[in-house]
């Protein structure tokens, strides 16, 4: 059993209510931090803990906090990124829905560390019912003296507000999020300046993911030393993984980052194996933007070593034979599921979500969607596969924000590992909607397939 | 002239107070949500009204309303089924659910039934991929959909007098 730091109490009866949460030890990190630590000491502790951003990029959180500019007389802001829109990802929702006070607790400690007197939770508009859950938790925290003026007699003032978005994946990108919070269209800004210097209303700003900010609670409670011991290497602490696709037990799991991918996929504690007695074909292990891997490269690296559920191991082999931890959105395809169709839906997604500011992204995502649609519907040519490769190459690295790369990578990886499946679509136009290509050389190594 | 009832006006003031002095433009997204709840969709008149409440130029509100996919810029049915169609949901049968709903209601995605009761929309990942297939109806998700559950949901809507929020 993995040790649980975030979801340990998530299923205690009534934990959404303040009294139960407090009885279970809630808000002790606020007491500890505000009464016995200076703000910079908290940042140091987070630095030492090795915590890495859980929103997708995995940037060290303490380091990010230490970049925050602190000019005198200028307000600073902390924003919690609860936009959660990357296909395959639904972990933040779980945390906020089941144990909302944990996030509020983490936000108070983090706001104190950064000197944010007004902290915003930017939540995707579709999570409308969670807004109410969070607002209730905030009201309870305030009624009990954890928010408001002069918290615990320290002179620190803090309010937390929930701000709903309105349907735009791009608003998860931190500068687009800031624009959106300012009441504008979600167009990403050109960096630099970085938000740490010029963010919300041109003030120094830190944007962190829900899970990142919740993890500050166990870091303060246990101390960085203890936190570090959980996990492995530069993947410290626990990670929430949202598992979906064709598995027996889709859902959100908190894991220690030293378990193998094989254990995660097949153990009854987690995904419980592939549904319907099928074989594993492929997996996108870190949200739709990261490269898809065929089963053989998912369970073992190209060197034949066991692959583990952590930042380093999942990216072992680079993009040629590896992938990324990303947001922790773990998507499984079984032997009968079509990589071309799946990639087509993702291309549609990115075309729909491009903000349209840069032409390689705006035009390129449209091209990719059209070509993939043709191939999926039996109207593709062999040369389309190379054209598709070309288009994704021209997007990558040529845009204002990383959405362009995020759109290009899944297409590139699908062609890299499943080119034969694309070719099969071109050669069998009558059949490609009726049946699937099925397993070939990339079959599940546990149960060798008959090609 | 459209306008909010008194308690909604109060709610607007509460929302505006969340942002520092002079930054009330930030209230535009939440207030547009209130307008959509109140009026069903965002007509030009409704957007102009929001602009006047927040002391913005109407164009500032139009710009925003047209960017975000949750705002309806055309009238919609009383019940809007927004079915997720992105990859992870597709792997769990969202295509079948979308065509089944369409068949049952006699409409295609993007259309509204002639009696103004139902609109069918396809949307992108709702952040619930493990509970697929699913749809959003008002403020809530209906998850783990099957054809039987769709039948029951449509009946529930037909029998309900309110909007099921
Ligand atoms: C297109 C795009 C979408 C993103 N969506 C999210 C999101 O939904 N949630 C999130 O926490 N980070 C998202 N990010 C990453 C944020 O820009 C930012 O790096 C993150 O919120 C930082 O928090 P962290 O360091 O705690 O991970 C997205 C980035 C891009 C480029
Ligand atoms: S890469 Fe795409 S989403 Fe990002 S700024 Fe450019 S057009 Fe917008
Ligand atoms: S893909 Fe449908 S909810 Fe994520």
Image (tube, rainbow, N blue to C red):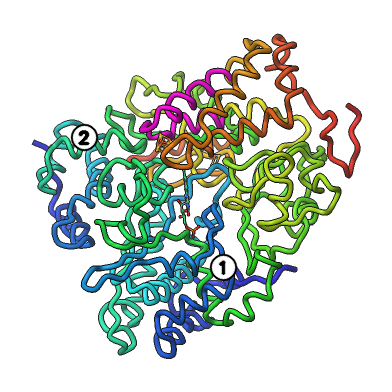
Pointer 1 residue:
A51
Residue at figure coordinates x 46%, y 75% from the top left: A43
Q: Is mark 1 within 8 Å of ligand 1?
A: no
The prevailing secondary structure element of the residues shown in magenta is helix
Could you tell me residue A422's position as x and y percent? 70, 21
Please provide percent x and percent y for residue B127: 51, 46
Instruction: In the rendered view, tell whether residue A207 sits above or below residue A391.
Output: below
Instruction: Label 2, secondary structure: give it.
Output: helix
Q: Mark 2 = which residue?
A: B62
Nearer to us: label 2 or label 1 = 1
What's drawn in magenta, residue-wise?
A345-371
Residue in the picture at 61% in, 42% down: A290
Q: Is residue B151 visible?
A: no
Describe residue A353's horizontal placement relative to residue A382 as left or right: left
Please tell me which residue lies in front, B70 or A81: A81
Which quadrant of the structure image shows residue A382? Answer: top right
Mark 1: few/some/many CA within 10 Å (<14, 14-19, 20+): many
Callout 1: residue from which chain? A
């Amino acid at each position: 059993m993995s040790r649980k730091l975030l979801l340990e109490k998530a299923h205690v009866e009534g934990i959404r209510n303040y009294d139960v949460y407090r009885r279970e030890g809630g808000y002790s990190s606020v007491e500890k931090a505000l009464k016995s630590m200076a703000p910079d000491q908290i940042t140091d502790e987070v630095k030492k803990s090795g915590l890495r951003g859980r929103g997708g990029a995995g940037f060290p959180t303490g380091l990010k906090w230490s970049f925050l500019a602190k000019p005198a007389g200028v307000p600073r802001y902390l924003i919690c990124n609860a936009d959660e829109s990357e296909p395959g990802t639904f972990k933040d929702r779980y945390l906020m829905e089941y144990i909302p006070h944990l996030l509020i607790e983490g936000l108070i400690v983090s706001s104190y560390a950064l000197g944010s007197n007004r902290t915003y939770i930017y939540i995707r508009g579709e999570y409308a019912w969670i807004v109410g859950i969070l607002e209730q938790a905030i009201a309870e925290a305030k009624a009990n003296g954890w928010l408001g003026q002069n918290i615990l007699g320290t002179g620190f003032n803090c309010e937390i507000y929930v701000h709903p978005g309105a349907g735009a994946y791009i608003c998860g990108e931190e500068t687009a999020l800031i624009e959106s919070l300012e009441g504008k269209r979600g167009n990403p800004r050109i960096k630099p300046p970085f938000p740490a210097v010029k963010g919300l209303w041109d003030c120094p700003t830190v944007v962190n993911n829900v899970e990142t900010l919740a993890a500050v609670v166990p870091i303060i409670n246990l101390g960085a030393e203890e936190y570090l011991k959980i996990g492995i290497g530069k993947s410290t602490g626990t990670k929430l993984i949202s598992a979906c696709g064709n598995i027996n037990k889709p859902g959100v799991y908190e894991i220690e980052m030293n378990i193998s991918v094989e254990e995660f996929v097949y153990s009854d504690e987690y995904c419980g194996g592939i549904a319907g007695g099928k074989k594993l074909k492929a997996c996108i292990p870190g949200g739709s933007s990261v490269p898809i891997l065929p089963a053989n490269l998912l369970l073992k690296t190209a060197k034949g070593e066991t692959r583990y559920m952590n930042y380093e191991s999942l990216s072992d082999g680079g993009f040629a034979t590896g992938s990324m931890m990303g947001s922790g959105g773990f998507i499984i395809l079984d032997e009968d599921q079509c990589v071309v169709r799946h990639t087509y839906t993702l291309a549609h997604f990115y075309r729909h979500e491009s903000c349209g500011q840069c032409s390689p992204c705006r035009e390129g995502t449209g091209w990719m969607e059209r070509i993939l649609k043709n191939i999926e519907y039996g109207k593709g040519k062999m040369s389309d596969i190379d054209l598709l490769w070309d288009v994704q190459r021209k997007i990558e690295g040529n845009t204002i924000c990383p959405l362009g790369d995020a759109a290009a990578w899944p297409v590139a990886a699908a062609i890299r590992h499943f080119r034969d499946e694309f070719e099969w679509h071109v050669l069998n136009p009558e059949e490609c909607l009726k049946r699937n290509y099925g397993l070939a050389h990339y079959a599940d190594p546990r149960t060798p397939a008959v090609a | 002239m459209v306008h909010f009832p008194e308690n909604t006006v109060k709610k607007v003031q509460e929302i505006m107070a969340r942002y520092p002095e002079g930054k009330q433009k930030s209230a535009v997204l939440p207030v547009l949500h209130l307008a959509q709840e109140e009026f069903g969709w965002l007509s030009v008149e409704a957007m102009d009204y929001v602009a006047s409440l927040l002391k913005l130029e109407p164009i500032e509100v139009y710009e925003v309303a047209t960017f975000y996919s949750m705002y309806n810029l055309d009238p919609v049915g009383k019940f809007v089924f927004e079915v997720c169609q992105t990859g992870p949901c597709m792997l769990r049968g969202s295509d079948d659910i979308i065509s089944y709903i369409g068949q049952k209601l006699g409409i295609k995605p993007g259309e509204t039934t002639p009696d103004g009761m139902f609109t069918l929309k396809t949307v992108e990942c709702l952040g619930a991929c493990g509970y697929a297939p699913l749809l959003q109806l008002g403020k809530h998700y209906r998850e783990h959909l099957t054809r039987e559950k769709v039948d029951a949901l449509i009946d529930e809507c037909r029998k309900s007098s309110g909007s099921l929020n």
